[in-house]
Image (spheres, rainbow, N blue to C red):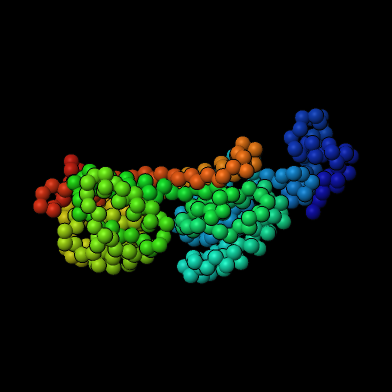
Amino acid sequence: MITVKEIAKRCNVSPSTVSNILNGKSNVGAETRSRVMACVKETGYQPNYFARSMRKQNSHVISIITEDLTVFGTNPMVEAIMAHCEMNDYRTILMNLRLYRKWGSSWYHESEKLKASVAPVIQEALSIKVDGVIYVAGHCRLIDCFPADFPIPTVIAYGLSKDHKYPSVIIDDEKGGYDTAKYLVAKGHRNIGIIAGVADNLHVKYRLLGYQKALFEEGVPFNPSWVSYGKWHRKSGYEAAKKLGCDGITALFCMNDDMAAGAYDYLYEQGLEIGRDISIIGYDNMALADYLRPSLTTSEIPLSGIGKKAAEILLDTLKGEKNRAQPAQVVRMPCTMIERRSVAALHTAGRAVWENQPHEE
């Protein structure tokens, strides 16, 4: 690899002159600058960022550690992190743990297994002198895989740090559940079934808490027998809807769009028309939500917003605009309701009809 010294020798200038030119400083004559840049282009010189970080106090490099790039939501967050870092002249290095690909869901409650996977990755990040780390979780839970004496700023995205030293950016799931219940009650629904995800999942717990708060405010009793737990995929939505049955329920709150699609499958088998005989609302705003018939009303998760906010917090810390000695913040990003055609206003005798909305063809 050609070095700054070799460029300087070829151009008959000092290494400091070459360095000034590469760093955009203006104290070099136009002829010299042109000659050096021509040599850089001819030789294919590339700066050695890692060597430079050894000489300086910072490298302007951020490490992004993801639990798995194949998980729903990870890519939009990573893209937003990279974009914000790039806009602020920081480079990023992506490190993918591939946890779901390797172990499915078996590692969730095995903290030592997770720590053993993360430890060499964070040591690599330290060895290449990154300025900070953003850890992108696959789903919201307590993250406890960084040592207490980890020396560089770190932010957790899509998860809650168990150590209050590290800031976290998560979905405001409680408000999401609250807003969903308020929306359904405003449409006249009081007998609302819930197809939740895995029972001990933090997304489920917070969405259910917000849902119950909204029902309490509206004077609508909460019926625990109308809650059925699934496993986030379409088939489990089908099974959960089958377990709930249809008697008395006028609307279903499905905690993700895949399970909502499974509920569609079951209800159509029963000869029910969604958006008329029964209403369904989802969560996530996945691509399939717009392709279901009728199209699915759902809540959009601010995935890009979570990634950008995590990057903002980290860069503000690096710039000294946040005090690392203060307790770390937890930022909750609100979701946005996307109204489509699967929820209708309830009229009479448990039958729902469209409220000033045309049917889809």
Report if residue 356 is visible in the image. Answer: yes
Identify which residue is drawn at 71% across, 46% down.
59
Q: Residue at x 68, y 51 (%)?
A: 151
* Identity of the residue furthest to the left in this view: 349
Q: Nearer the viewer, residue 281 or 203?
A: 203
Percent of width and height locating residue 216: 26, 47
Q: Splitting the image into 4 quarters, where does residue 97 fall?
A: bottom right
Image check: 31 left or right of 86?
right
Q: Please tell me whether residue 127 is drawn above or below residue 186 in the rendered image.
A: below
Q: Is residue 315 visible?
A: no
Q: Eyeballing the image, is 68 above or below 166?
A: below
Left or right of residue 81, residue 23 in this image: right
Residue placed most toward the observer, 216 or 192: 216
Residue 184 appears left or right of 87: left
Numbered label tally = 0
On-image quarter of the N terminus: bottom right
Identify whether 111 is placed above or below 12.
below
What x and y, as percent, mark residue 127?
72, 56
Q: Is residue 172 left or right of residue 137?
A: left
The image position of residue 281, as x and y in percent, is 28, 52
Q: Please name the residue shown 82% across and 49% down the image.
A: 3
Residue drawn at (48%, 44%) of the image: 331
The x, y position of residue 24, in whole percent, is 74, 35
